[in-house]
């Protein structure tokens, strides 16, 4: 019982540390999604030129989602006419280049990891674009499109099909401050939380259990701690494999990344581990349903290769610049609740969340929430709720 309580205590401390950052990130994402329609996004993603991929990354970062919702949304964009490479760039950015991830990394691990994530993400997207150009054949892409058009439902497909942006004309501020804008923002905010909550809770519990129960000596041996070159070469290779086996994705894998970093995984290995939220086993199965088994295998190989290389780029670039933090100073948050800046920020942002949840409940939100797991072909535009 003492061991269980210790694990839960660590998980609770991590939760308290990151609560305000999560609310901030999802609130900003909800604002963007409340005023930008998906049809506008699709119109900007029609090819795989560098400028288009940069646009896809920017739009993805502004439309933060859990990994399941990001995969479903990328498939929805692909079906509507977006280029496949651009859709994958959007998918990567919407889970790995988002505000809440950067803030949480800075809070739990240090600003260097935030910088590494925002450097490694574009590197991974560029590498994928090259790999797709070299190895993605037209026949395989046609098969993937045919499979995608069959409308097979997957996790979060109903959520991906919903477009809650307001129709009102006018400036960004005018649309946002309208009653429709307030309602749409509250709906996106709550539904994004509903999409991520399971993975976040599982990730925190797993991280707490591993931090409490697995001795550091195991991780030091597994990650070749004490052998600098071997650790740097091994970390980016094994990081994604640990992520695939952990079943934890999206923001939920950051607490586990803290434990792995404290245990001795390399700097680049942490970055590769976080990127691999899009390769966990349930998502690989969704790729198979969406695009077919051959494309799922192709995505596994190309994503994995891009993650490993991006991890090496970050490892040696940041190492060469002397920006890798001292691993000996790594620690898992265990302080719990105290009267500091974190508590005041949590109170402020929990109040904001309460306002948005209240608006959500008063404007037909619960009924929409029940539709999140529905078929994309039954999705509707919900911006009309008041």
Image (cartoon, grey):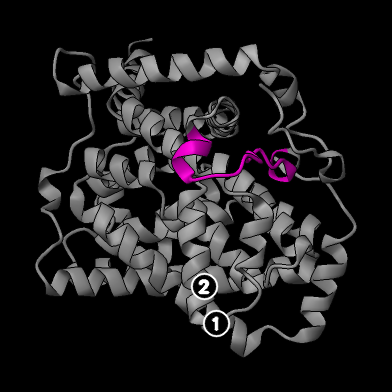
How crowded pointer 2 is (Cα within 10 Å; few <14, some 14-19, many 20+) is rated as many
Q: Residue 208: percent from the left, percent from the top?
A: 36, 28
Spatial CA distance of label 1 from label 2 is: 6 Å
Name the residue nearer the viewer: 135 or 357: 357
* Residue 70 position (above or below residue 27): below
**Residue 133 horizontal/vertical position (percent):** 60, 87
Residue positioned 47% across, 50% down in the render: 62
Residue 321: % across, % down: 11, 71
Q: Residue at x 17, y 13 (%)?
A: 338
The disc placed on residue 53 is 2
Q: Is residue 221 above or below residue 341?
A: below
Look at the numbered disc 1 and give the secondary structure of its residue. Answer: loop
Q: Quadrant of residue 247?
A: top right
Dots 1, 2 in contact, CB < 8 A:
yes
Image point (46%, 15%), residue name = 355
Q: Which mark is residue 298?
A: none
The residue beneath circle 1 is 49
Q: Is residue 306 left or right of residue 133?
A: left
SS for dot 2? helix
Characterize the local packing of mark 1: few (<14), some (14-19) or many (20 or more) Cα atoms within 10 angstroms: few
**Viewport quadrant of the C terminus:** top right
> Which quadrant would residue 103 be assigned to in this image?
top left
Q: Residue at x 54, y 44 (%)?
A: 170
Magenta residues (range) = 159-176
| Residue 352 in view, yes or no | yes
* Image quarter of residue 313: bottom left
Q: Nearer the viewer, residue 182 or 297?
A: 182
């Amino acid at each position: 019982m003492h061991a269980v309580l210790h694990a839960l205590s660590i998980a609770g401390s991590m939760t308290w540390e990151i609560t305000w950052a999560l609310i901030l990130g999802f609130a900003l994402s909800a604002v963007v999604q409340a005023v930008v329609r998906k049809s506008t996004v699709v119109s900007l993603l029609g090819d795989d030129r560098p400028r288009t991929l940069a646009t896809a990354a920017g739009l993805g970062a502004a439309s933060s989602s859990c990994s399941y919702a990001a995969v479903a949304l990328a498939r929805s964009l692909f079906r509507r006419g977006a280029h496949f490479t651009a859709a994958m760039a959007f998918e990567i950015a919407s889970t790995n280049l988002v505000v809440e991830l950067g803030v949480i990394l800075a809070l739990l691990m240090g600003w260097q990891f935030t910088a590494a994530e925002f450097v490694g993400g574009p590197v991974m997207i560029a590498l994928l674009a090259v790999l797709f150009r070299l190895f993605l054949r037209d026949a395989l892409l046609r098969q993937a499109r045919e499979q995608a058009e069959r409308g097979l439902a997957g996790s979060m497909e109903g959520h991906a099909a919903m477009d809650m942006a307001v129709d009102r004309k006018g400036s960004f501020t005018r649309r946002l401050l309208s009653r429709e804008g307030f309602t749409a923002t509250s709906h996106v905010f709550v539904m994004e939380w509903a999409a991520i909550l399971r993975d976040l809770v599982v990730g925190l519990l797993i991280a707490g259990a591993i931090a409490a129960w697995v001795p550091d000596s195991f991780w030091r041996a597994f990650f070749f701690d004490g052998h600098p070159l071997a650790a740097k070469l091994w970390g980016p290779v094994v990081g994604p494999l640990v992520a695939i086996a952990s079943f934890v994705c999206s923001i939920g894998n950051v607490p586990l990344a803290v434990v792995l970093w404290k245990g001795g995984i390399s700097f680049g290995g942490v970055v590769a581990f976080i990127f691999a939220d899009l390769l966990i086993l349930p998502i690989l199965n969704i790729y198979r349903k969406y695009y077919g088994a051959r494309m799922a295998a192709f995505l596994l190989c190309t994503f994995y290769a891009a993650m490993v290389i991006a991890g090496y780029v970050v490892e040696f670039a940041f190492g060469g610049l002397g920006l890798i933090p001292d691993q000996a100073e790594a620690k898992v948050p265990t302080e719990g609740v105290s009267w500091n800046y974190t508590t005041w920020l949590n109170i402020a942002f929990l109040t904001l969340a309460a306002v948005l949840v209240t608006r959500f409940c008063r404007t037909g939100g619960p009924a929409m929430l029940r539709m999140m797991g529905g078929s994309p072909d039954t999705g509707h535009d919900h911006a009309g709720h008041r």
